[in-house]
Image (cartoon, grey):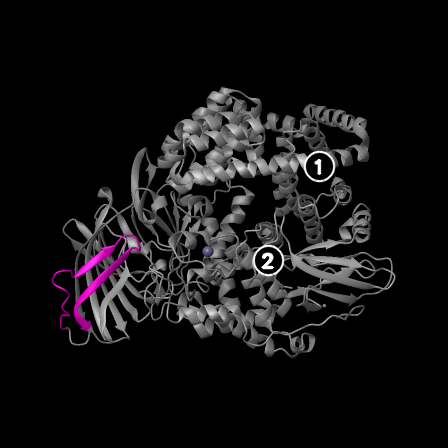
Amino acid sequence: MFVPIIFCILLGAISATPHDDFRSNLEFADYGTNWVNNGYRLNDFVQPTEMIVDLDVYLRQFRFDGVVRINVDVTENQLNQIVLHQNLVKVEGVNVVNAVTNDPVPLKITDPFSVNSTFELLVINFDSPINSGKYAITVRYEGKINENPIDRGFYAGYYFYNGAKRYYATTQFQPYHARKAFPCFDEPQFKSRFTISITRDNDLTPSFSNMAISRTEQIGNRVRETFHPTPIISAYLVAFHVSDFVSTEYTSTASRPFKIISRQGATAQHAYAAEIGLKITDALDDYLGIQYHEMGQGVIMKNDHIALPDFPSGAMENWGMVNYREAYLLYDPEHTNQNNKNFIASIMAHELGHKWFGNLVTCFWWSNLWLNESFASFFEYFAAHWADPALELEDQFVVDYVHSALTSDASSGATPMNWDTVEDNLSISAHFSTTSYAKGASVLRMMEHFLGQRNFRNGLRYYLRDNAYKIGTPENLYDALRQAASEDFTFARDFPNVNVGAVLDSWVQNPGAPVLKVDVNMETGLITVTQERYVVTGNQPSNPTWQIPLTWTHAGEMNFTNLRPKTVLSSPSTTIQGAPGHNWVIFNVAQSGLYRVNYDSHNWEMLGSYLKSTNRQNIHKLNRAQIVNDLLFFIRSNDISKALGFGVLDFLGSETDYYVWAGALTQLDWIRRRLEHIPQAHEAFTNYLLSLMNAVINHLGYNELATDSTSTILNRMQIMNFACNLGHAGCIADSLNKWNSFKNNNETVPKNLRRYVYCTGLREGNATDYEFLLEKYNSGENTADMVVMLRALACSRDQTRIVHYLQESMNNDKIRIHDRTNAWAYALQGNPENLPTVLNFFYNNFAEIRTKYGGEIRLNTCISSFTAHLTSHERIEEFHSFVYQNQIALEGSFSVGDSVARSANANMLWGNANAPEIYEFLNTKSGAATIVASSILLLAASLVQMLR
Ligand SMILES: [Zn+2]
């Protein structure tokens, strides 16, 4: 969402690329006929037009019988086979008829059908070749309800109610798991209507699917429910759910139904999701100009949201029936902290955004997953912001998504948004990544600022209108945005010869993201800007050119509100005529674009002294956030001297803003960890960080005020958590105070302070503190709060408790399968002294971890989390030799372990190379004596806190 050029005239060229010369066109030419040599892909000359799926579900036996009838259009003659997807227990029979005449189509007697388990296919062999026309395929089969939710497909989970364990079964089909529930054309491009029937046991509540129930039949002691046909959708969007769950209806309007559904016992936690979800639906209806509830093609779309105790991903946008992890839907005003409240709003907005982007218009193939996920991630923040501006999600978008996109793009291995090597299941899964989500959303936000809010919105409306119930391609989107821009004469006036599609396409096709190098000649006013791909470590694999919409302002005439670009940089370098004068410049106003900015030394020095002055807040908070984040990366990549970089960063010593600190903390911690094996530098850097944080800690205070804004609450959470971990005496004393009141007097800790208060209580306590919190965990009813406790339990320094914790992570059925790997990471984060314990546990139990955590991918996640914590040569060597000695038993995880050891080693080398310069800066800055003195000051401050 988001400039008259008075003082600047562009001297460099704004070049336009030829109208249709996009690399993605080549890819779509290939798509027209599909990939001939790719065994995973289906041919598009057999198109499903209708799917009727009938399942007989035996929940307690974890199995089902299925019959599916698939109507297809065949557009080719002389066809010997029809090939579709399956990944079932057993295909029992296949039968094909001519759908017009109802005549049977004979199959090969010797070999009527076969299954290919490598490519997950069902191959139907005809006795003699068939010609184009309409056919109906019926398949009878046996399927299983997966007992491990990580396996996806149709899977079972459990919960406890009145002391009894109850089971439920639900689905997660994206991206390639629908074939585990019924044979189908399991690629996003194949869209059809689905009619679902489910037969279940009598003692369960009515089942759920995408659509409302149209018919209920009693069959013996079982019940069969048939649902209305869906609109035209891809197989991965089909969903159903069999359980004794209960729902709360939140609207009295028959034409706009809205329900929150959960296990029994949690209905008191439904209200917030309903309140915000209804507002988000309304906001998206208005913005996109297509009503959600009217998308059902003849049937009213229902709007159900189901909280699941076990869920392999965060949430899933099945049309009419969205699935969530409980922590992302159920809100308890006493227990759900601000972070989790924001998650509930933003994740609902993400899933609702998908109803238009993904469900109504679907990406053609997973290589262009961004056409679904970037939009959902964009609305995740902005639609939730429209529904409740007090959550401040619009600004958080920058420090959450723009920063994480730039972090991910700083890797030399970054992949492009349009990643044309996506072909098999592994590469499909890998593309559900920061690139498709955070980066894509950041690029869309940049395009919105470039086109203007209204043009951008109109472009999205054209894209949806022209491609509804069909597939979308990047080219369809470029066309729609070009059309919207062409209707605005001011755009054509301000950006003559700029091809909107080409601008966006450069971001879609190029891997990585650029850094803008800015050199200001203050005598002449000439500003030289040069773009290149930013890579934090290693060689630059390629140096493409982006078309970068540029915004900037300067000290002589500050403007941080006009985010409309002044020009588009489409060449590697250009010069801009600015006003002569001794003024700093800032590019990328409010970080409205997806690029870093590195200035010449003099401009940095001027920015540094301005930021240290009392005028600091005249520079937009999001630019202050960008400056700290960029500088810390430039320090990491040696693109700036430590003295200059840290010299500017010194302004953090008086900074109190949430956003600025959010841009800094992760990277400051990254540097601190790289110094862990050099105690002198590590201690000096830790003390430096503590001194930088004094002002913000004093500003926030240890107690919440009723008037605190969302960002103040979030700031206290992030700052105190970091400060307590660094050993800030005041933070520790106050937290202990609160912890002891909780433990001894049952005085509840305010929900937003629990993470660091609990952690400090356990860190400074003993086994009894651990047992106390574990008991609270085991009797918890709000999942988000339970995750806070799970994290804090790992803060215990009692290593027998840490072993107990790791055993619980495998065996305690209150720790959900999706939280097991989190527990592992928390055990490593709890205390540095936990590392040897966790390593030993890994050495002795990796095979069991693999089974109990849900498979090899989960074990790999555990192994990867060692990287940041292996900070001594001895540990790295020990770990590396274990991995080598056990490579056969480690199976596919061996290579992950090997690369973890190499990365940990590279991290240490960074510390070795940079510690002297950092130490020197800290010494020159304050002198060794001053560092000691500041520790004494901190101690004094903490004594004051303890006496309060
Ligand atoms: Zn999504």
Q: Amino acid at mark 2?
A: Ser
- The vertical placement of 553 against 59, above or below, is below
Per the image, the residue denoted by label 1 is: 693
- Let me know if residue 144 is in the magenta part: no
Whether residue 814 is visible, yes or no, is: no
The residue lying at 35 percent from left, 70 percent from top is 297
Please tell me in which quadrant of the rendered image residue 255 appears: bottom left
- Quadrant placement of the C terminus: top right
Q: Position of residue 743 (x, y in %)?
A: 52, 24
Per the image, the residue denoted by label 2 is: 542
Look at the numbered disc 2 and give the secondary structure of its residue. Answer: loop
Which contiguous range is marked in magenta? 103-129
Q: Position of residue 442 (x, y in %)?
A: 58, 58
- Quadrant placement of the N terminus: bottom right
Label ID, residue 414: none
Whether residue 144 is visible, yes or no, is: yes
565 or 426, nearer to the observer: 426
